[in-house]
Amino acid sequence: MQHIEPYYNWRDLYISEEDDRSPFYGRIYSEFEYSNTIYNFYIHPQWDDFDSPTLYLKIIFADYETEFAIIELIGEWNDCINNDIMLLKRDIIDQLIDNGINKFLLIGENVLNFHGSDDSYYQEWYDDVDEGWLCAMNFRPHVLSEFNNFNIDSYFIYGGELDEFPWRTYEPNHLMDKIESVISRRLMI
């Protein structure tokens, strides 16, 4: 797991630790000291910790004018024991919403498992974005199945072409345009 880095090809466009509106503003990273773990497996030091022992993230792009953020995740999403959604919502998402972000794209190809609890924080997040949306892309099928078991599908848009989307082939603004067109087609049906 230590070799899985957050996506870095957009760093010439956005760096969360240099964004004064980011929850990670001013954070300093080491390329050589590995300290964060997921079940005793070290992860790359570029992933951001938000007090979950099993889930880490990286805000790989945020655009406050067009009101969207792209967040890449790694680890095990555990609402049942760690209440990861509460930590994510209170420590990361609320600050982004306060700064005008209302469209969230979560990339979950490195999320290994999901353990749900209730959906109250998801509903709160959904209610907080008003005219925006929440989208989950490239999550593993068993994770999406668990999302469905806990009614997370009521709040996030996922499935279909979003399950294996080649997002790395796009620039961030083009990716968001593409996602918006997918969402618009689904809402028109």
Image (cartoon, rainbow, N blue to C red):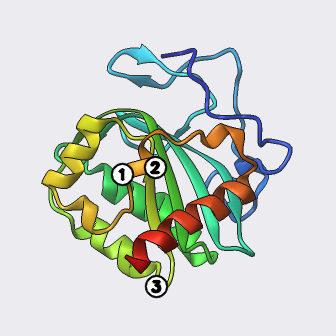
Q: Alpha-carbon neighbours of circle 3 within 10 Å: few (<14), some, or many (≥20)?
A: few
Name the residue: 36% across, 63% down.
156
Name the residue: 69% across, 14% down.
32
Find residue 3 and report its horizontal and vertical position in percent. Answer: 58, 15
158 sits left or right of 93 in the view: left
Amino acid type indicated by mark 3? Asp
173 sits left or right of 188 in the view: right
Which label sits on residue 162? 2
Amino acid type indicated by mark 2? Leu
Find residue 109 and report its horizontal and vertical position in percent. Answer: 45, 34
Q: Residue furthest front?
A: 189
Q: Which residue is mark 3?
A: 130
Which one is nearer the viewer's eye here, 4 or 107?
A: 107
Vertical comparison of 152 with 186: above or below: above
Residue at mark 3 to residue at mark 1: CA–CA distance: 22 Å
Amino acid type indicated by mark 1? Gly
Give the secondary structure at mark 1: loop
Q: Which residue is mark 1?
A: 159
Q: Alpha-carbon neighbours of circle 2 within 10 Å: few (<14), some, or many (≥20)?
A: some
Residue at mark 3 to residue at mark 2: CA–CA distance: 22 Å
Q: Are marks 3 and 2 in contact (CB under 8 Å)?
A: no
Q: Is residue 17 visible?
A: yes
